[in-house]
Image: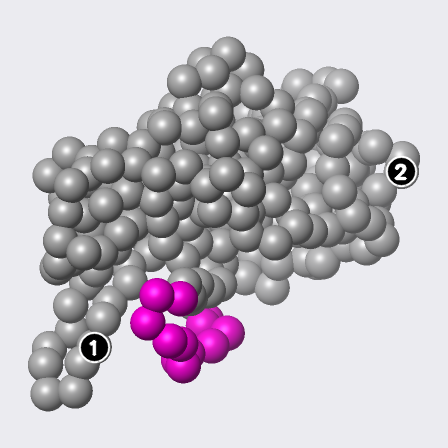
Amino acid sequence: MFLGTGVILLSVILGIEAQRSVSQKKASWTKSKGKSVIFDCEATGLSSGDYVHWYQKKEGEPFKRSVTQKKASWTKSKGKSVIFDCEATGLSSSNYVHWYQKKEGEPFKRVLYISSGTGSTTKDNDHPQNADFSGEKSGNAYKLKISNIKMIHAVIEAQSLSQKKASWTKSKGKSVIFDCEATGLSSGNYVHWYQKKEGEPFKRVLYISSGTGSTTKDNDHPQNADFSGEKSGNAYKLKIPNIKMIHAGTYYCACWVYHRDTNAVDY
């Protein structure tokens, strides 16, 4: 989920593509037939157009990609509908595709599972909102549907970002503070500040911890020494004490909800 808003400094616009990394906490399990298993993959620095692929490898056989998700997250209003789409290949008629929900600080909860053979959907009776979800199989697509979105379906609820002032005109050598108001964040969240210049990708300048208020500058930004960050209550501030022409651009504050997908989806 992305929440963001923009600010204009002087008149132009910049960015870095975040470094991508993928790590797997545990690569193998020993399980009995009939049991369930979840493989967990941590991916950072991905854009909304990236994909995480899962492959199966058997001795003496080539890699087989088994499950692909076209889109891992959505931003939707209450009362709207959403469909999560998972493409699964190479399954036998006795296999199942399971959909899980993961909320921050809570364990995975299975929502439902869909039979590869018959396409029938079985809801998990242990999920407190199981009546809100439905499943469907169409070819190799295994879909999770929420027809009427409620706040309880979200991974992090009631988040909002707003900026008190949307633009500044400043002379070189002056200072400027961009102020971003963020509510509904947990102590494990961060507010990120990005710079955008025309014709260039976004570059992250720094990010501020909602829990501790500490600021971490992005080492990949060529002018990171020129910026500082500060948290004061619900305000997350980006400061430039000595404006230079190279700082001209549009600045965005954003909060990301990270998704840790196995064969599961977080919303």
Is residue 122 located in the magenta-colored stretch of the structure? Answer: no
- The Cα–Cα distance between marks 1 and 2, rounded to whole angstroms, is 50 Å
Q: Is residue 245 above or below residue 82?
A: below
Is residue 28 shown to the viewer in this render?
Answer: yes
The residue at the point 13 percent across, 53 percent down is 93
Q: Residue furthest bottom?
A: 60
Residue at 40%, 58% (x, y): give it. Answer: 262
Depth check, front residue: 87 or 115? 115
| Three-letter amino acid code of the residue under disc 2 | Ser
* Visible residue check, residue 201: no
Is residue 31 in the magenta section? yes
Q: Which element is circle 2 on? A: strand
Q: Main secondary structure of the magenta part?
A: loop
Mark 1 secondary-structure assignment:
loop
Q: Nearer the viewer, residue 107 or 81?
A: 107
What type is the residue that disc 1 sits on?
Answer: Lys
CB under 8 Å between discs 1 and 2: no
256 and 34: which is toward the camera? 34
Which numbered disc covers residue 57?
Answer: 1
Q: Badge 2: how crowded within 10 Å, few (<14), some, or many (20+)?
A: few
Q: Which residues are magenta?
A: 23-35
The residue singled out by tag 2 in the image is 232
Residue 129: % across, % down: 55, 30
Q: Position of residue 174 (x, y in %)?
A: 79, 35
Furthest-top residue in this view: 79
Residue at 25% of width from left, 32% of height from top? 136
Foreground mark, 1 or 2, reads 1
Above or below, 158 relative to 214: above
Give the camera-side residue of 216 and 112. 112
